[in-house]
Amino acid sequence: MTAPRKQAKSDSFEGLRVSEPDCYHDFRGYYWTICEDPSGDYNHDKVTVSRRDVLRGIHGDFSTTKMISCVYGEVYCVVVDKRPESKTYNEWRWTMLSHTNRRSIVLPPGVGLSYLVLSKEASVLYKLSYSGKYKDADKQFTYKWNDSELDIDWPINFPILQKRDK
């Protein structure tokens, strides 16, 4: 896979953060902290398990902050700025998330998330922060994975998609 130029870094979009925590490693495996949240702001966790070539998203809303971590496997993660007032509106960035790089990405409200599973299988942890009720699928924005206006450089031509993402 040739990596596209628009790599996600903490200065890519206002409010976006990319982190790579320290890790303890020994003969048994790895141990790392994904999130220390003394404020208790993260109030909802979700986990997805997907197989190779599954492409999830581009989904988001305008009231939820999301921390995304791949706790097993490897995913090509794409974030899209859908905040109309932002100077990076409609721009996208990518980063690799995996259990070996232990990278997490925090998306502010209005930044959409999508990812493609590159490993045989991947487990992705979502930590969500919002007030009020959770904005489920019917209250989220969704963009087609190959939207010509966004022109995302995906390393696949025929991903496995759910109906919502086609």
Image: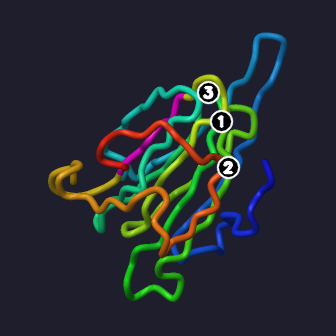
Give the amino acid at mark 1. Leu
Q: Residue at x 59, y 29 (%)?
A: 52
Give the amino acid at mark 3. Tyr
- The Cα atoms of the two marked residues, 2 and 1, are separated by 9 Å
Q: Residue furthest front?
A: 158
The residue that disc 2 covers is: 155
Magenta run includes residue 124: yes
Per the image, label 3 sits on a secondary structure element best described as strand
User: Could you say where residue 87 lies in the image, as x and y percent from the top left?
Assistant: 51, 88
- Nearer mark to the viewer, of 3 and 2: 2
Q: Residue at x 22, y 48 (%)?
A: 136
Give the amino acid at mark 2. Pro
Residue 113 shown left or right of residue 11 in the figure: left
- The Cα atoms of the two marked residues, 1 and 3, are separated by 11 Å
User: Could you say where residue 18 lies in the image, as x and y percent from the top left?
Assistant: 64, 58
Asked whether the residues under the numbered discs 3 and 2 touch, taking CB atoms below 8 Å apart as contact, a structural biologist would say no
Q: Which mark is residue 118?
A: 1
- Nearer mark to the viewer, of 2 and 1: 2
Q: Residue at x 68, y 48 (%)?
A: 96
The residue carrying pointer 3 sits among few (fewer than 14), some (14 to 19) or many (20 or more) residues within 10 Å by Cα, namely some
Counting labels gives 3
Asked whether the residues under the numbered discs 2 and 1 touch, taking CB atoms below 8 Å apart as contact, a structural biologist would say yes
- Which region shows up in magenta? 123-128
Q: Which mark is residue 72?
A: 3
User: Could you say where residue 19 lies in the image, as x and y percent from the top left?
Assistant: 66, 53
Earlier-in-chain disc, 3 versus 2: 3
- The Cα atoms of the two marked residues, 3 and 2, are separated by 20 Å
Quadrant hosting residue 139: bottom left
